[in-house]
Image (cartoon, rainbow, N blue to C red):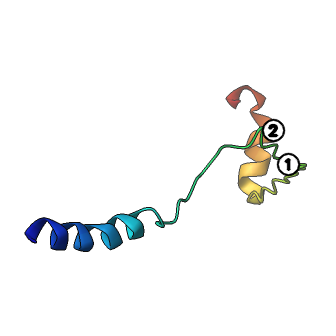
Amino acid sequence: MRYLTAILLALPVAGLTGCTPRIEVAASDTPITINMNVKIEHEIHVKVDKDVETLLKNRSDLF
């Protein structure tokens, strides 16, 4: 009798474990491409004091 109740209790549990959902993650066959069309422009503005500007003109050997 005990074996019969054990089997009757085990059957629904075994049936429920067969219905568990399965999730699968797979990699793509094609590679991932990232197209970056980037144009970089820059401008540098330098403001120089009049005294420094004349010094740079007179002493070109500084730089």
The percent coordinates of residue 62 (x first, y second) are 68, 30
Q: Are marks 1 and 2 in contact (CB under 8 Å)?
A: no
Residue plotted at (46% across, 66% down): 20
Quarter of the image with the N terminus is bottom left
Q: Amino acid at mark 1?
A: Met
Q: In the picture, residue 17 is in which quadrant?
A: bottom left
Crowd around label 2: few <14 · some 14–19 · many ≥20 (10 Å):
few
The percent coordinates of residue 57 (x first, y second) are 82, 39
Q: In the picture, residue 30 is in which quadrant?
A: top right
Q: Amino acid at mark 2?
A: Thr
CA gap between label 1 and label 2 equals 19 Å
Crowd around label 1: few <14 · some 14–19 · many ≥20 (10 Å):
few
Residue plotted at (17% across, 74% down): 5
Question: Relative to residue 48, is residue 27 depicted above or below?
Answer: above
Q: Secondary structure at mark 1?
A: loop
Q: In the picture, residue 6 is in which quadrant?
A: bottom left
Q: Secondary structure at mark 2?
A: loop
Residue 61 versus residue 33: which sits nearer the camera? Answer: 33
Residue plotted at (73% across, 25% down): 61
Q: Identify the residue position indicated by label 2 in the image.
A: 30
Q: Identify the residue position indicated by label 1 in the image.
A: 36
Residue furthest out toward the left? 2
Earlier in the chain: of badge 1 and badge 2, it is: 2
Residue plotted at (78% across, 55% down): 46
Residue 12 versus residue 62: which sits nearer the camera? Answer: 12
Quarter of the image with the C terminus is top right
The percent coordinates of residue 55 (x first, y second) are 73, 43
